[in-house]
Amino acid sequence: MKTAGRFLIGTLLCCALSAAARAQASVPGKAYVAAIDGAVTFTLSGQAATLKKGDSVVAQGMWIETGPGASAILVYSNGTSIFIDAQTIVEIRKFVQQSFPAGIDTAVIEPSVSDTVAQVKQGRVIITTNQLAAGTSMIYLTPQSQVNIRGKEVVIEVRDQVTRVLMLAGDATVTPSSAAPGAVGQTIHGGQMAVVQIQVMPLDQNAANQVAAQVAAAERAQKVVVFSTGNADGAPDIQARAVVPANLPVPLTVSPSTLSTGG
């Protein structure tokens, strides 16, 4: 009974500590610029920024775009690094993490629970993580997929309407953007890869025929109005004017007396 009681107390204590950790307030995570090579454009919360190697900035809201032959390496404050290859566009939509004490080797273990949401719009990124904390969420979006990363080395490449996810080590779950709500996706492990693409197929002619009348009506509507820029209360204003034929057709009336009876 004493052993069972100690076990129960230990379990309750662990649960309490876990709940306390989850209840900690998150703080804005930072990104450290570890390397820049070539033309790299940084935008922070909508404003262009000039960053150099060694700079550290709030990552959330950052937009990175690399030119031909250019690259950049960022290290998040949770210890994860991201190599941004040439001609790549990445947006860090969200990155927050819980507070943590100094002295933790972030190259080995994540110092606190974090939440990352980023989007690879085009190009290629290589993400390497340490041992992620329990409860951490790391999501990378592409036009074709959602990639939930649990570590440790993953390449995400977006080119020609195709996303390729190369799992070098660790595992991740890949879910197509077109999947039904609640879909769990496919888990891939080290040594595996996933390919997600937008499928292009021939036009369904029957479906096109069903909307032919609406298309024609919309095209006719384009011809019944013209737009111009004028002034409204001293400020530029776009104005619409209905098109009226210059010469309206004259109604033609035919008297029955003039009709031939064929006799």
Image (cartoon, rainbow, N blue to C red):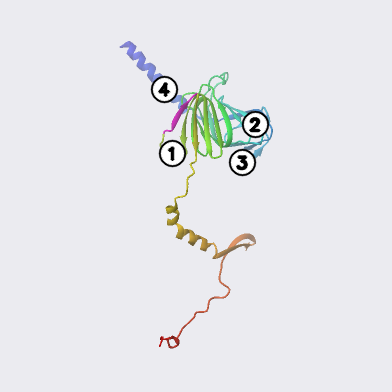
Quadrant housing the N terminus? top left
The magenta stretch spans residue 28: no
C-alpha separation, residue under disc 1 versus residue under disc 3 = 31 Å
Task: Work out whether mark 3 precedes mark 4 in sequence or the reverse, and give the earlier one.
Answer: 4
Q: Which residues are magenta?
A: 184-190
Q: Residues within 10 Å of mark 3 (few under 14, many from 20)?
A: few
Helix, strand or loop for disc 4: helix
Name the kind of residue labelled 2 in the image. Ser
Q: Circle 3 is placed at which residue position?
A: 46
Task: Work out whether mark 2 precedes mark 1 in sequence or the reverse, and give the earlier one.
Answer: 2
Residue 36 in the image: x percent, y percent? 67, 30
Q: Circle 1 is placed at which residue position?
A: 179
Dots 4, 1 in contact, CB < 8 A? no
- Please name whichever residue, 242 or 205, is drawn nearer the observer in this view of the structure: 205
C-alpha separation, residue under disc 2 versus residue under disc 4 = 44 Å
Task: Work out whether mark 4 precedes mark 1 in sequence or the reverse, and give the earlier one.
Answer: 4
- Please name whichever residue, 240 or 235, is drawn nearer the observer in this view of the structure: 240
Name the kind of residue labelled 1 in the image. Ala
| Picture quadrant of residue 237 | bottom right
Dots 2, 3 in contact, CB < 8 A? no
- Please name whichever residue, 112 or 256, is drawn nearer the observer in this view of the structure: 256
